[in-house]
Image (cartoon, rainbow, N blue to C red):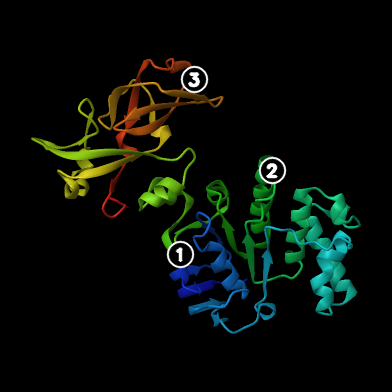
Amino acid sequence: MADVSLTNLHKTFDRTEAVRGVDLDIAENEFLVLVGPSGCGKSTILRMIAGLEDITKGNIEIGGKVVNDIPPKDRNIAMVFQSYALYPHMTVHENMSFGLRLRKYSKDEINKRVLDAAKILSISELLNRRPRQLSGGQRQRVAMGRAIVRNPRVFLFDEPLSNLDAKMRGQMRIEIKKLHQHLKTTIVYVTHDQVEAMTLADRIVVMNDGIIEQVGTPDEMYNAPKTHFVASFIGSPSMNFIPCQLVKTTDGLNIKINDKLSLSVPKDRLDRYKVLASKKAILGIRPEHLTNKKQHTHDMYEDFNAKVKVLEPMGMDTMVFFDLSEAEVCARCDPKSVEKIKSDMAFTIDKSQMHLIDPQTNKVI
């Protein structure tokens, strides 16, 4: 078990800068998830921690020791890849023990470690099978078992669930969470799936174009995004973004969305939002904070009407789509309270959950 520290980390491929000055401290026993779109640099960072990519500039420390020039085999880390990379001619036991046999561990020690790992992963009955006899989820468990038997200081996971179907991904997320709780080992996990990030992480690192946009807990990422990119990337369905303008009034500020709809700014946000007074802005609101009209007396809630464009039944909820200020907006509504397509419908917005974004900086005010 060890902490990991990245200092001013850079990686350049030819003239392309894939990672641009990343600083990040990962605590011992922490489950940290790197998330972002393809090409943002997250897998490159993981491969540099593993020693599979050279560092252009900066330092990586594992357990307080700089490992820039230490070969992968001597870093005492274990990596689980997107591809299971199992030897087809070997049994599960032989695949899991292969690395230990190369390191000349005794047969008793190898057998003990394999049996312990198989028990943790609930694959004890599969040890004599070969990979072709296993499902995708079972193969991924074997790949994880091969990493566990090494008893590494740090686990690295590079999109390990992307080859599985939706149901199996959900099951494996639970297994990986249990694994971390059992082993209490530092885990750095890379994914492009924000659902995986939200459900697995102690902390999330959202990356974009080689830099870190924000670091925080899943709750912080969801409820207090710092940039337009983080607000759009975290959450499913995605946050709504509505062009607007801040208009001064005699008693405060209004968020003008169109000629028919203006929302008063809550008093506790006037100081924050006054920097955008008389300027264009973007109103961010999640679908669950924009619902069918409900009875309320609190001044944080405000009602308006819009014409239903599309209905998307989801069982417990129905997603209602409509247009506001040239933006397509999604509201999460009670299926029993929705109107027909092309009909006017009354909605309630929870202003305590709104986010105002400066389009010049793309930062949340």
Q: Are marks 1 and 2 in contact (CB under 8 Å)?
A: no
Q: Earlier in the sequence, mark 2 or mark 3?
A: 2
**Mark 1 element type:** loop
Instruction: Tell us which disc is closer to us: 1 or 3.
Output: 1
Front residue of 166 and 181: 166
Q: Is residue 3 left or right of residue 99?
A: left
Inter-mark Cα distance, 2 to 3 = 29 Å
Instruction: Tell us which disc is closer to us: 2 or 3.
Output: 2
| Spot occupied by residue 342 in the image (x, y as percentages of width and height) | 39, 17
Q: Which mark is residue 335?
A: 3
Check disc 2 and report the residue beneath it.
165
Q: Earlier in the sequence, mark 1 or mark 3?
A: 1
Q: Are marks 2 and 3 in contact (CB under 8 Å)?
A: no
In the rendered image, which quarter is residue 65 located in?
Answer: bottom right
**Mark 3 element type:** helix
Q: Residue furthest front?
A: 15
Q: Is residue 55 left or right of residue 238?
A: right
| Spot occupied by residue 237 in the image (x, y as percentages of width and height) | 48, 37
Name the residue type under label 2: Asp
**Which quadrant: the N terminus?**
bottom right
Q: Which mark is residue 210?
A: 1
Inter-mark Cα distance, 1 to 3 = 42 Å
